[in-house]
Amino acid sequence: MSAKIIDGKQIAADIREELKAEVAGLKEKGIVPGLGVILVGADPASQSYVSAKEKACENIGIFSDDNRLPAETSQEELLALVERMNNDPKINGILVQLPLPKHIDEAAVLLAIDPDKDVDGFHPMSVGKMMVGEEAFLPCTPHGVVQMLMRSGVETSGAHVVVVGRSNIVGKPVANMLLQKKEGANATVTLCHTRTKDLGHHTRQADIIIAASGWPNTITADMVKEGAVVIDVGVNRVEDASRERGYRLVGDVDFEAVKEKASMITPVPGGVGPMTITMLLFNTVESAKRANGID
Ligand SMILES: Nc1nc(=O)c2c([nH]1)NC[C@@H]1CN(c3ccc(C(=O)N[C@@H](CCC(=O)O)C(=O)O)cc3)C=[N+]21
């Protein structure tokens, strides 16, 4: 059996249409959601993500305040910019693209963002609220994963989800979100990582595998139960001289082999990536609504 491909690009486009209509409605009330974007340094992957985010904002009518700062920017300068955005009523969301250069304390910068504008959901206040099940901005990639499952009709309630990877931006939050007592969650969650003994033993128990290890081919076909749903969060650049860019993008899953065993699978590109950006737009619109007492 060949798996049904979960089309992240299509689901993302559907959500963006919903957001577009919502932004148009806000505009009639004189409200334009605004996203402050900060990129420090010139990492090519970060530059392309940030450009994609700005393009997506423009496309649905969100105002974006683009700040590209040199790699030598000091922590004080960065904190001053965050503070300016915290106090700017036109800005509803602040996105500091990660990773930051080594001389900057990432945790200090995330802590400086006003939690009411924390559309990335990385502030400890947002993380804590999410964990105890209070309303908070949900981190974009995990939120995108949950939306993909819901909109593809995948039952998570009572299902065994095995998450591979324990990062603060994907593994830990996605495990937590799927554990919550609410719609689109209620799963039994196993969280695996680099020190896990016999990873395949765990993944073979999974009804749903979420691969977020950061390494190509972490999940091979022998590690997947027949009929499992496989969500691939990986975005790995591998050298490929036949491509114009000199590389191609692969996930953490051995897609070609695993798709013959899974019931549903996400591709890379065109899977979780477009959802990540879409949920950032979602959070920014949400923040603009909250700031104006709507909802
Ligand atoms: N503060 C912060 N917030 C983030 O959300 C954040 C971050 N820092 N740092 C880096 C990661 C990575 N990330 C992606 C976004 C979109 C795609 C995406 O759209 N990928 C396309 C392909 C893009 C291409 O072809 O290069 C796809 O998978 O189809 C991927 C990865 C957001 N991140």
Image (spheres, rainbow, N blue to C red):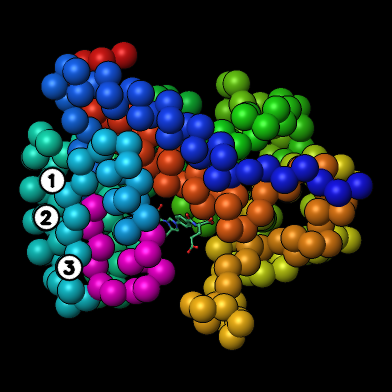
The residue indicated by pointer 2 is 81
Which amino acid lies under the numbered mark 3 shown in the image of this protein? Answer: Leu
Which amino acid lies under the numbered mark 1 shown in the image of this protein? Answer: Met
Q: What is the residue that sits farthest to the bottom in this orientation?
A: 241
Cβ–Cβ under 8 Å for marks 2 and 3: yes
Residue 232 percent location from the top left of the image: 65, 54
In which quadrant of the rendered view does residue 165 lie? bottom right
Viewer-nearest residue: 96 or 62:
62
Residue 105 appears anywhere in the view: no
194 lies left or right of 172: right
Q: Secondary structure at mark 1?
A: helix
Q: Which residues are magenta?
A: 37-49
Please check the rendered image and state whether residue 46 is part of the magenta-colored stretch, yes or no: yes
In which quadrant of the rendered view does residue 11 lie? top right
The residue indicated by pointer 1 is 85
- Distance CA(mark 3)–CA(mark 1): 15 Å
Q: Residue at x 66, y 54 (%)?
A: 267
- Distance CA(mark 2)–CA(mark 3): 10 Å
Depth check, mark 2 against mark 3: the one in front is 3
Residue 203 percent location from the top left of the image: 79, 52
Cβ–Cβ under 8 Å for marks 1 and 2: yes
Which mark is drawn over residue 69? 3
Residue 218 appears anywhere in the view: yes
99 lies left or right of 222: left
Please check the rendered image and state whether residue 51 is part of the magenta-colored stretch, yes or no: no
Q: Secondary structure at mark 3?
A: strand
